[in-house]
Amino acid sequence: MSIRVAVLGHGVVGSGVAEILLHQKDCIFAQRKEELELAYILDVRSFPDLPYASLFVQDINTILQDESVSVVAECIGGATVAYDLVSACLQAKKSVCTSNKELIATRGNELFAMAKENGVNLLYEACVGGGIPVLRPIQTCFGANNICKVSGILNGTTNYILSRMQETGCKMEEALKEAQQKGYAEAVPTADIEGHDAARKISILASMATGKYVSPFDLPVCGIQNVTAEDLKYASVYDCSVKLIAEFEAENEGAQLSVGPCLVPNSHLLAHVNGVQNAVRVVGDMVGETVFYGPGAGKNPTASAVVSDMITLTNLAPVERIYWSSEPAKISEKEKTADYYVRFSGQSGAKPLSGFENVSFLSDPENQATCAVVVKNTSRSRLEKALADANIGLIARVMA
Ligand code: HSE
């Protein structure tokens, strides 16, 4: 038996999906006893030299009107054109899977409702952690748990950049170029560098954990744009590595969420997650701490997750969905205290920090130009207020 499927977009992920569908045909058939037949690829560009050039179409109506196509994979990205195409497919009663985090994090609510109305399904495993299975396991294997905390390294590009800067001493721009060449970065890489991609992913995880919608616009987001080679050096003086950490914690007052660079002690598991690898730590009240680890970006790992969703969609009863309610989750306004690393200049030494009890110098205290310190047990806002007249290079939480 063969099930006809279509792919929207032939970029890094879309081309990976097409190749896996063609090259792994026997593997998929051996497991599922049915063939996934790639019927169409939608792209505005044409690729005449490809062996499957005849599958390209430029008009979505070709796919929408073909009733034999039951599953569509969206690999275009963004939340505008992709939204229109995904809604058109759902309304045409085709199940959809997507690797598009921006779409699910910002417009998932509308699309889930649309899928439900039309008796089809929408899956999005590839949106978080690239090739790592994490969303489905949270939904299917932790059913007896309240999810208390989800944290980790959720962006492959920034983790690759920080690892390369640490290993080779190269500049951020150079490492970004490599990440782009390897197909890790977003089309507009500021989404990676400034933390928005990680924010979309933690908002998806937090929405799944709470069962209510957490918007990526409702959390404090800072990327790695201000991290310098100096910060990496000072962090290592403190026996830490610098990582971009996304976090969700369920608290009585509501959800606590953040995305930002952190100093992670080298004794911590996350300090050893390097390159494009991601690690998602999920804490359930019954299971305790679990960690999901693997390639967080890249053509084949991400396409592997998309194709797995396609296979699932061919077998799944349309009622089994992994959706949250559109009701907004309660977000806590309470500010937590922590140890903070801060690098600043433009003040005479660390004078503005004289009101803080526990300050460790990582830079030479005689060097008045740059101060790199760890201030223990403070709130970020208190620190920012004390350093209002200084030129702050970076503030990063030190992970407990
Ligand atoms: N740009 C993303 C990343 C791709 O680097 O993690 C995978 O979601």
Image (cartoon, rainbow, N blue to C red):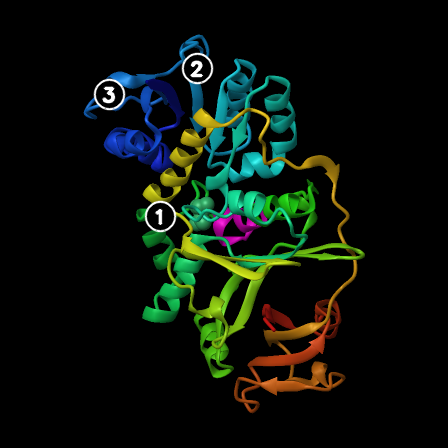
Q: In the displayed structure, would residue 321 be above or below residue 396?
A: above
Q: Which mark is residue 89?
A: none
Q: Which residue is mark 1?
A: 180
Q: Nearer the viewer, mark 3 or mark 1?
A: 3
Q: In the displayed structure, would residue 271 be above or below residue 13?
A: below
Q: In the displayed structure, would residue 387 be above or below residue 222?
A: below
- Residue 311 point in image, percent of width and height: 40, 30
Residue at (35% x, 30% y) in the render: 32
Asked whether residue 196 is drawn in magenta, I would say: yes
Q: Which residue is mark 2?
A: 60
Q: Are marks 3 and 2 in contact (CB under 8 Å)?
A: no
Q: Secondary structure at mark 2?
A: helix
Q: Which residue is mark 3?
A: 53
**Residue type, numbered disc 1:** Gln
316 or 245: nearer the viewer: 316
The boundaries of the magenta stretch are 190-200
Residue 392: tell me if it is visible: yes
Q: Secondary structure at mark 3?
A: helix
Mark found first going from the N terminus, 3 or 1: 3
Disc 1: residue Cβ within 8 A of ligand 1's nearest atom: no
